Image (cartoon, rainbow, N blue to C red):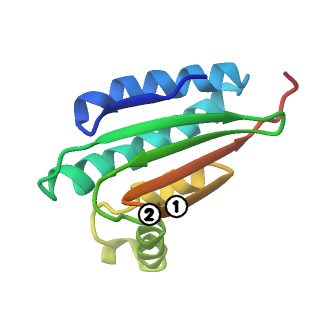
Amino acid sequence: MESLKVPGSLDSLGDITRYIKNAAQSAHLDERSTYRLRLAVDEIATNVIIHGYEEAGLEGYIELHTELTPEALTIHMDDTGVTYDPAQSLARSELFLSKEIDQRPIGGLGVFLAIQSVDRFSYCRHGGHNRNSFVVYRHSST
């Protein structure tokens, strides 16, 4: 499957969603796995756009690459925004969840839900790029 490169703006989320749906269809993912992958990629892409580009006063792109094996579908999402490791937000989210509901701040759970939605998630920063990788195991035969 070809890569997708779009501007790092909220207007690009529709294109990203279509790309993920096509990748999931190519991988023969079931409806639930497709939804969870879309949720994860959309949440992280939205954070990249808002925090990595808009709030930082930067412009850039988001590029998606698909890796398909008999075992899994992997989506790699690269951007040139400010360094942002979603695992740091995950730690804060887990701390929020340990508090009583009336003591939790509003928001902050999107990254937690995103990372929990896929079978494996990883982040790295290399050469001025952030790379978020989302892995969904293929449970059905292709």
Amino acid type, mark 1: Tyr
Label 1 sits on a secondary structure element that is strand
Q: Judge whether 84 appears above or below 7 on screen.
A: below
Whether residue 40 can be seen here: no
Q: Judge whether 136 appears above or below 122 on screen.
A: above
* Labels 1 and 2: the sequence-earlier one: 2
Which residue corresponds to mark 2? 86
Which residue corresponds to mark 1? 123
Front-most of residues 97 and 6:
6
Front-most of residues 86 and 58:
58
Coordinates of residue 28 in the picture (x, y in percent): 73, 22
Residue projecting furthest to the right: 141
Q: Quadrant of the C terminus?
A: top right
Whether residue 30 can be seen here: yes
Amino acid type, mark 2: Pro
Image-based side of 121 in relation to 103, left or right: right
Coordinates of residue 62 in the picture (x, y in percent): 36, 40
Q: CA distance from mark 1 to mark 2?
A: 7 Å
Image-based side of 139 in relation to 83, left or right: right
Label 2 sits on a secondary structure element that is helix
Image-based side of 75 in relation to 13, left or right: right
Callout 1 touching callout 2 (CB < 8 Å): yes
Give the residue displayed 44% in from the left and 47% down from the top.
78
Q: Nearer the viewer, mark 1 or mark 2?
A: 1
